[in-house]
Amino acid sequence: MITLNRWLSQKKIQKELNRDGENVGEMPKVFFDFVPNLYGKREKRVVKVGDGSIVKLFDRTPIPQKPSDVVCPHFLELKWANGCCFNCSWCYLQGTFRFLERGKRPFIKDWNKISLHLNALFEHNSKPEILNAGELCDSLIGENQNPPASKRLIELFATQNNYKLLLVTKSDRVDNLIRIEPENVIVSFSINAIPVAERWEIGAPSPRKRIKAAAKLHECGYPVRVRIDPIVPVENWRIYYQELIRAIFSSFEPERITLGTLRGLSTTIRCAKDTSWASYLEEKSNWGLKPRFDTRKESFKFIIDLLREEYGFTKVALCKETLKMWEELGADYREIRCNCIF
């Protein structure tokens, strides 16, 4: 059922769009299809809203068949913005936006269109979904706006109860979020070991600052997730990642943790200014080059065992990791509960 607030919001948006001379007509159409899940069964899912430029199903990873196929459950992208103000050496946005004159410099799309497409989605009481607002950008790139972008997005999601907003960030600029009631929103922080971040996550806040920001939001009642991705097998990596885990759990307990290792898509490597990280890539998958299998397995097992033995924490998943890896770790990939889904 559509709420009065959402109906009034829709009317205001349509009025503003018509005033600007755009051909709005009715709300954009919501497209559905029967999409295979990791069990191989087809389920009715939203695949896009309107032209797919704002809301679209991420389905570029096929259901895994071969041992080298990566596991990635399909999720809804909220493509409200592009780009990032940080300069991580391995950022895939360097390749994704290589043909744009602005490159990966932050760009926020038209708010009227964002609102219109989200309200169209919210009218459909379909399967509950999380919308990932950080697949093509850092989710906190718009905190200098008035009102802040995070506030506008969260207020849109607060008008319904079927969809949740996922903010994915390396930023520590959470003052605006602290002042907002955390309704239908999840925040996920990408945090790496200190030497790895200092070497390759150029311009991003230090891991300590990210942990402090995450702890503040956790204290305010936000569900907070953590991505430790990419794990890089630098010298003494066990010491550094153990220190990272201890720093996180001494501050707060994440809702879940998703682990990943380096993934080198060909376009990312070609467009990267610093390719020193690519020296760790040795093995092919259907999602780019990866470090050697045994190296990845050792990294995952070390962190998973550490979390379980020291903290009794088992809510851990792997990001874009191969079917073979899931099997080798004795985990059921079909039961994945990773960063981008419920």
Image (cartoon, helix red, strand yellow):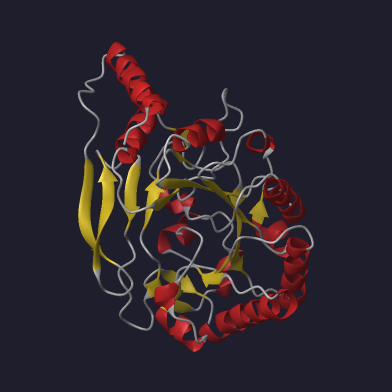
Q: From this view, report whether residue 32 is shown above or below residue 66.
A: above
At a point 37% along the width and 30% down the height, the residue shown is: 3
Q: From this view, report whether residue 283 is shown above or below residue 5.
A: below
Q: Quadrant of the N terminus?
A: top left
Q: From this view, report whether residue 67 is shown above or below residue 239.
A: below
Q: Quadrant of residue 314?
A: bottom right
- Is residue 235 at least partly visible in the picture? no
In the rendered structure, the answer to whether residue 153 lies left or right of residue 215 reads left
Q: From this view, report whether residue 294 is shown above or below residue 12.
A: below
**Could you tell me residue 27's position as x and y percent?**
25, 30
At a point 77% along the width and 75% down the height, the residue shown is: 239
**Could you tell me residue 287's position as x and y percent?**
40, 68
Front-lying residue, 93 or 66: 66
**Could you tell me residue 162's position as x and y percent?**
39, 46
At a point 67% along the width and 62% down the height, the residue shown is: 192
At a point 43% along the width and 77% down the height, the residue shown is: 333
In the rendered structure, the answer to whether residue 44 lies left or right of residue 295 reads left
